[in-house]
Image: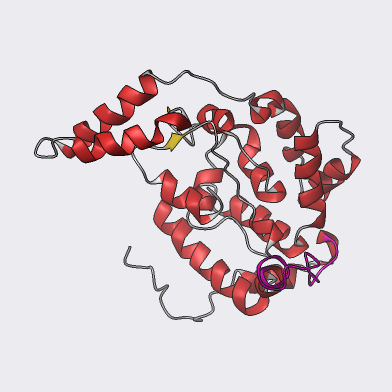
Amino acid sequence: IMGGGFGLMAGADFRVVTDTSVMAMPEITIGLYPDVGGSWILNRLPAKIGLFMALTGCRLNPADAMYLGLANRFIDHAFRKKVLESLQAADWSEDHYQVASDVVQYYADNSAGWLPYSKIREHRDLIARMMGKSNLSAIIADLKALETEDSWLEQARNIALTGSALSAVIAYEQLKRSRYDSLKEVFQSELVLSINCVLKGDLQEGVRALLVDKDNQPQWTYSVIEEVTQEKVADMFAPPWGESANPLSNL
């Protein structure tokens, strides 16, 4: 469940993970930012873990997802075929929600309960301390100074330091601006950012390096976040349609 998959999953009644599930918001690696409602979802996670996810693209396991409330059911992957068969065989003439709930809950109740260790839970205090700094420069400085033998933390730190500096600034600013926004307002602001990331951000270069040429050598517009000017930030948040109404104004 990567990037936009978070937005789709967040709207589901039954958010199921298995022992093989992996979740992440890795947009910083392609010059984007956590979209598809990511601004709304991440702002509602505890201890500024949402900001950490946006800046580091860290990978969550099923235990992390359950701990953060991003998933609400755990089912052993071995039951996957049986879950689908049970849904197909169910009597859908009754209340659809209850039918789905009964099937999902049955297999959740009968799962072995094996979950990997939650890295988010283990490092919650450290994450809160680093992400709680008063500005993005201080946060990045803490990530640079982080000394750890934990491979999960190390990978998260390295992604933050090699990803798009412009994306880091945009993600930080967007989460700050949208902290108290409604879901409608979040979608409206994300539409602005998404278009601008395509037209004048790092998205084209990020997609080229990671998905097209696959050389994993993106040439980002800015080497470090300090190079990103306030004028550039304002430009990225400026509606590309000028004074006209936001296309999502009637949501």
Q: Position of residue 54 (x, y in %)?
A: 65, 49
Left or right: residue 134 versus residue 80 is: right
Query: Can residue 37 be spotted in the picture?
Result: yes
Q: Is residue 210 magenta?
A: yes
Left or right: residue 121 versus residue 185 is: right
* Colouring of the image: secondary structure
Left or right: residue 75 versus residue 163 is: left
Of the pair 108 and 165, the residue shown nearer to us: 108
Residue 206 in the image: above or below residue 148: below
User: Residue at point 80% right, 44% down?
Assistant: 157
Q: Is residue 233 magenta?
A: no
User: Residue at point 81% right, 68% down?
Assistant: 222
Q: Position of residue 46 (x, y in %)?
A: 58, 32
Q: Position of residue 66 (x, y in %)?
A: 51, 29
Determine the residue located farthest toward the left in the rendered image: 93
Label the magenta part by its dominant secondary structure. loop
| Total marks placed | 0
Residue 111 in the image: above or below residue 250: above
Q: What residue span does the magenta drawing correspond to? A: 207-224
Residue 43 in the image: above or below residue 124: below
Quarter of the figure with residue 230 = bottom right
Residue 31 in the image: above or below residue 56: below
Query: Can residue 182 be spotted in the picture?
Result: no
Of the pair 128 and 218, the residue shown nearer to us: 218
Of the pair 193 and 153, the residue shown nearer to us: 153
Q: Position of residue 132 (x, y in %)?
A: 72, 37
